[in-house]
Amino acid sequence: MMNKNIAKASTAYPSLSQGKTAAEAVLDGEVKGWQRILPFLGPAFIAAVAYIDPGNFATNITAGSQYGYLLLWVIAFSNLMAVLIQSLSAKLGIATGKNLPEVAREHFSKKTSIFLWMQAELVIIATDLAEFIGAALGLYLLFNIPMLPAALITVVGSFAILELQRRGFRAFEAGVSGMVLIVVLAFAFQTFLAQPNWGEVTVGMFVPHFDGASSILLATGILGATVMPHAIYLHSSLTQNRVIGRNDAEKKRIFRFELVDIIIAMIIAGAINMSMLIIAAAVFHTKGMVVEDLDVAYNGLHDALGPMAAISFGLGLLIAGLASSSVGTLAGDVVMQGFIQRKIPLYLRRAITMLPPLVIIASGVNATYALVLSQVILSFGIAFALVPLVLFTSKKAIMGNLVNHRITTTLGWLVVVIVITLNIYLLWETLK
């Protein structure tokens, strides 16, 4: 079997027989056509999981049920921001061979690094709260398992996914990518059953407009929750040593391939988020229903489109929660090593970060309310990831020839201002 695999690989990448990796063969110009991108696919799909975590479900469904297709353009715009931000993170790892926390530790004081580590850990715990509760809620909806036993089953599932990492980064990437594919198919199926008005979908996607102050607040929630700090930290880690450029020209080529990876992954994440809003608009808004709870959405889909639609919704929620929780655990490992040069076993970290969600679930707190609360906590950490990212990638002494173009830096700071302003506004409206 192994010899057959080597033969197949050598056919696609002839230089592998000379001891080169697939990526090195591509960089040496020995591979042509679409196969050149294959060795570089993967990192962006891991980071993109953060953009479809359960925290986005409630916001998108509420927006669709309350305003129909009105706010689709907000998701499209937020996806463009995500492409820029994740490309900067990936580029930092490629150019420096270090991740964002490591670069920050080198350029900031020890006290600042410790503070950045502490707030990053808090953000990751809040993120993990949303993802863990989302997965448990998916089990509850699908199998009518009470939330606490569902949470314990989620524990087992999370450890099983992390086990993939021990088999190498390719196995983990393939596993997470497969889970993303399941979510895509689940929401594609629901969209097909919902039979949306595609003319109104097109208008909502390309014509920016609002309908009162409440729609602006919902748009703020969509945009403000788009940028996930842990995805920024993690993406730079995923690219820092995955394919190492031997010179500046190779680093530029690696980044161009990674940019394709990012665009594909963000299009998929954006399509999933849009489908949530489209389904809610087609099923609930047309009936005058405003849906803010995920269990209400599940039951509503069951009544309107049948049991298969509800099952696919619950499955999408479960898979998204499990996949994103494992990614959050990896991000926690990255920030601890990067900011304070400490490391704990991955399984111990997973066990520690599971405690807050288990306590909250055991206390009987409303799951959807807990998801919203986690997004509020997450908002505090966005500035501490975004500002250093744009700052470092705009310095030639750090980035070399991969330093940002002036236009890129300007757009980066514009995104920083927009996201931070929106999150401050969202925090104010949520807590007042």
Image (spheres, rainbow, N blue to C red):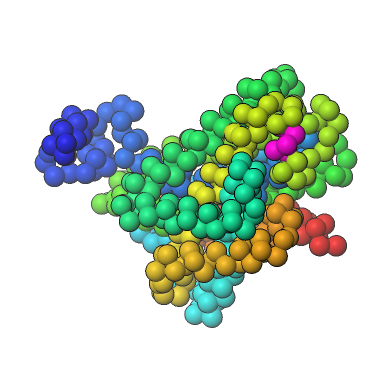
* Residue at 39% across, 69% down: 345
Q: Is residue 137 visible?
A: yes
Q: Nearer the viewer, residue 29 or 6?
A: 6
Residue 257 part of the magenta-drawn span? no
Q: Nearer the viewer, residue 239 or 133?
A: 133
Please provide percent x and percent y for residue 110. 49, 80
Left or right of 75 on screen, residue 343: left
What is the quadrant of residue 296 in the picture? top right
* Residue at 48% across, 35% down: 181
Q: Is residue 415 visible?
A: no
Quarter of the figure that contains the C terminus? bottom right
333 lies above or below 414: below
Please provide percent x and percent y for residue 286. 81, 26
Please provide percent x and percent y for residue 366. 74, 56
* Residue at 65% across, 29% down: 307
What is the quadrant of residue 193 in the picture? top right
195 lies above or below 335: above
167 lies above or below 98: above
Please provide percent x and percent y for residue 404. 48, 51
Secondary structure mostly taken by the magenta-highlighted segment of the chain:
helix
* Residue at 70% across, 35% down: 277
Residue 300 part of the magenta-drawn span? yes
Please give the range of residues in magenta: 297-301
Number of numbered labels in the structure image: 0
Left or right of 381 on screen, residue 338: left
Q: Nearer the viewer, residue 327 or 387?
A: 327
